Amino acid sequence: MKCYVPDYPRPQLVRPGSWENLNGQWDFAFDDDNEGLAKAWYSLFPPARKITVPFSCETPKSGINDPARHDVVWYQRSFGYKKSSERLVIHFEGCDYKTDVYINGSHAGTHRGGYARFSFDITHLVKEGENKITVRAEDSFDLTQPRGKQRWKDENFGCWYIQTTGIWKTVWLEKLPAVYIASVKMTPCVKDYRLDIEAEISVPSEAALKGLEFETLIYYKDHPVTGLALPVTRKHLELSASLKSVSVNAWHIALWSVEHPELYDVVFLLKRKGETVDEALSYFGMREIRIDGANILLNGVPLYQRLILDQGYWKESHLTPPDEKALIDDIDKIMSAGYNGVRKHQKTEDERFLYWADVKGLLVWSEVPAAYEFCDEAVDNFTREWMEIVRQNYNHPAIITWTPFNESWGVPAIKTSRVQTEFTEAIYYLTKSYDPYRPVICNDGWEHTVSDIITLHDYEEKGEDFLDRYLDNLEEILDNELYHNAFKSAFADGYSYQGQPIILSEFGGIAFKGGEEGWGYGNKVATKEEYIKRFDDITTAIKKVEIISGYCYTQVSDVQQEINGIMDMERNFKVDPAVLKEINERKISSRYRFKS
C-alpha cells in the first residue's frame, strides 16, 4: 500500500515525512494527594521516575509495574522545535480517562474518554529549541465512565482485570501546513461502482479558501484508476469518484472480501495555483454489507461468520500491544485457526490492527467499552466517546458491524425501563445517521431493543443439549416466552423478533491450562483430547442450526485470571490450530430448521 509506514499510528490519513513518534522514556509521577495542579507541576515538575510510553503504569512493560489504584498521574518530556510557518499538532491515540495537556506550562486542551484519539494544535505554545510537554491524566473507579474490562475494585474479579491509567497508546507530533486536509470520510457504493468522499479542510480564515483546489487520485495495484479535482469553496467538500475501469478486471471493479481483500490506494492533494500545499495518503475497500431477511450479505453473497472474541490483552503490556508485529501475529494466528473475523470486545484497538485486518481480510465487529451505571453523566460520557470512535474508524472496510452495547452493561434495567431502552434506540439512530450502511447491534447477547442482528450468548457445553434447545425452543426464545440461557430473554419488554439474522455471538469459553487455577465457562477440561472433543461438539452443533448465520467463540487468548483462550497469554496455542481450523471450516451436510 502506498500509505503504509511502519508504526504510523493513523493509517487512514498518512503524511509520511511530517511526524515524530513521542513514545519512549518520559518523566513520571503519581499524584495520590491530587496536589499537582495547586503546586503547578505543569511548570515545575516534581522529582520523578521514568516510564516507557505508551505502556500504562500498571504494566511491567512501562517500567513502573504498579497495579494499585492511582487516580492522578503526571508525565513530562522534551522535544525540539524549529520555528516555521507550519502548524504543529499533538495527537494522543488513547489516554485514560480525563487528560490535560500543557506545553511549556500553558494549557493546550482537555479531553475526556480513554479509548478515542484526540488532538490539540499547539503551534501558539511552542518556541524555537527545547519545549516541554506535560500531561496530567485523571482516572477513577467511577462506573459512569466507559471502562470496559477495567476493574473498579482493588482486586480482579469475574471477567474484569487490572485497570489502565493514563497514556496507553501512541503519542505523536505532526507538522501541517497552514491550510490542510483535516479529515476524509470514504463511503463505497458497490452497485454504482462509486466512491463517495467527504473532506474537511482546515483553514485559518474563510479568505484562505480562495484559489484552493482539492484533487483525488485513485490507484489499484499502482495503476491509475481515476482522478478528479474541484475548487474548494467551503471547508466541507463532497464529491464522488467513478471506479468503473476496464483496467482493473473483467468486472471493472475490485471488491474487498475475506477471500480477496482488494484495496485501492488514494492520494488527496490540496493545491493552490497548481502548487501542492498539502498531501495525504490513504486507501479504501469496495465492499457492501447489508441485511436481507435472515441473511447477512457481503457483496451480495450470504456470509457465514466464524468469529472469535478478542479482548486484546497481553501479559506484559495489558491493553497496549507490545508492538505492531504483535498485532500482525494475532491476526495471522486467528486466521490460521479457521476464523474469518473477530468481535473486538470491550476495547477500541490500536488502529494499526484495523489496517492489518483490512489488508489481510479479517472481519471486525467494533465495540465501545461499557460504563456500568445508568444516569445522565453516563449517557453523556458514553454518547460522546462512542461517536468519536465511530467517526475515527469509519473508513476501515474490515469493520462490518457496530456493537455499542453488550449484555445490558450500563443499561442494567433495560428489560423494563423505557428510559434505558430509549437511550439504546438513540444510540442506534445516531450511529445510523453517520453510518447508514453497517449493521448496528443493541444490545449484544440478550434483551435487544432495536437491532439489525439478533445475537445470543449461550455457554452450553454439550452439542446435544444445544440442539435440543435451539431446534425445539428457538421460536419460544424469539417470542420471549423462554430464556435462552436460563436467566435472560432475547428482547427487552415491548420489542420482538422481526426476522433479523441470528448469530450466537458468545459461546465456548473452555477453561484449559494444564491444571492451573483460573476460570472459564462450565467445567474445566484436563487434556487436549477433552478440549478438542468439546470444542468440536459445540461448534458443530451450532453450525447445524440453519437459522443461525454465524458464531463467536470465546476467546483468542487467556487474560489474567481467565484461562479460556485458544492461546495462553504468551500467544502459544493450547492445541494444534490446524485441528481448530478443520472444525471451524468443516462443511455441515445436515442443517436443521427450528420447529415452527
Image (spheres, grey):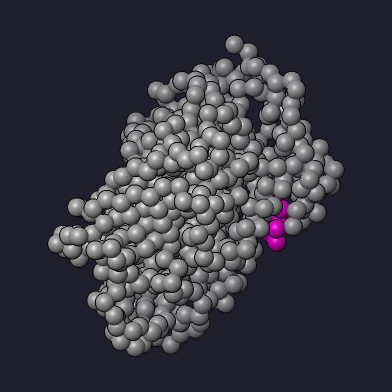
163 part of magenta stretch: no
Q: Quadrant of the C terminus?
A: top right
Which residue is at a point 50% across and 80% down the rendered structure image?
A: 25
Which residue is painted at 66% across and 58% down in the image? 329
Q: Main secondary structure of the magenta part?
A: loop
Which residue is at 53% across, 34% downward? 251
Is residue 422 visible in the rendered structure shown here?
Answer: yes
Q: Is residue 29 visible?
A: no
Total labels: the figure holds 0
In this view, the residue in front, 308 or 227, is: 227
User: Which span is picked out in magenta?
Assistant: 565-571
Extreme-front residue of the structure: 246
In the rendered image, the vertical position of residue 193 relative to residue 36, given as above or below: above
Q: Position of residue 394 (x, y in %)?
A: 42, 47
x, y (%) of residue 323? 59, 66
Which one is in front, 149 or 586? Answer: 586
- The answer to whether residue 462 is left or right of residue 57 is right
**Residue at the outermost top position:** 596
363 and 30: which is toward the camera: 363
- Tell whether 573 sits left or right of 502: right
> Quarter-wise, where is residue 570 in the image?
bottom right
Is residue 215 positioned above or below 579 on the image?
below
Residue 93 x/y as whole percent: 44, 63
* Residue 294 position within the rendered picture, expressed as x and y whole percent measured from the top left: 53, 23
For the point 42% across and 77% down, the residue is 75
